[in-house]
Image (spheres, rainbow, N blue to C red):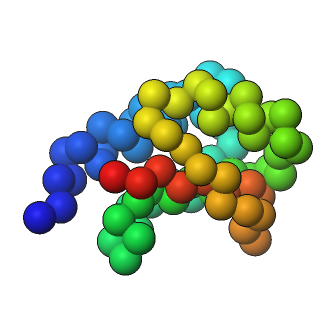
Amino acid sequence: MTDFDAIWRTQDEIRTVVNAVLGECIWNLAYDERRRAIVLELTQSLDEDAISNLCSQFSTAADYDGQGPRGTRFVFYM
């Protein structure tokens, strides 16, 4: 069973961290049922140092998921 409360709390935390570190640059932040993960796509492409810096700010483990159509993508497995 999917724990939507945990998903929403995690999404709020992700949004807070991204806004604090990069400013408002979230293109998409959604739960992917097939992957059982939250997928984050930014409106900008980040270099390796910025990716590493951002990933280190999250309390939930974030994996770099490549470049999407709009910008850098991350995945947070639940």
The picture places residue 27, in percent across and down from the top left corner, at: 63, 55
How many callouts does the rendering have?
0
Which residue sits at x=52%, y=30%? Answer: 58
Which of the pair 10/64 is nearer the observer?
64
The picture places residue 30, in percent across and down from the top left corner, at: 44, 60
Which residue sits at x=19%, y=45%? Answer: 5
Vertical arrangement, residue 73 with respect to residue 60, above or below: below
The picture places residue 45, in percent across and down from the top left corner, at: 83, 52
Residue 70: quarter of image: bottom right
Mark yes or no: residue 2 visible: yes
Task: Give the farthest residue toward the left.
Answer: 1
Which of the pair 25/59 is nearer the observer?
59
Residue 46: quarter of image: top right
The quarter in which the N terminus is drawn is bottom left
Task: Give the farthest residue toward the right.
Answer: 47
Which residue sits at x=59%, y=25%? Answer: 57
Vertical arrangement, residue 67 with respect to residue 13, above or below: below
Q: Is residue 18 left or right of residue 47?
A: left
Task: Give the farthest residue toward the bottom.
Answer: 34
Vertical arrangement, residue 49 with respect to residue 5, above or below: above
Which residue sits at x=59%, y=50%? Answer: 63
Mark yes or no: residue 23 visible: no
Q: Is residue 26 left or right of residue 30?
A: right
Q: Is residue 49 left or right of residue 3?
A: right
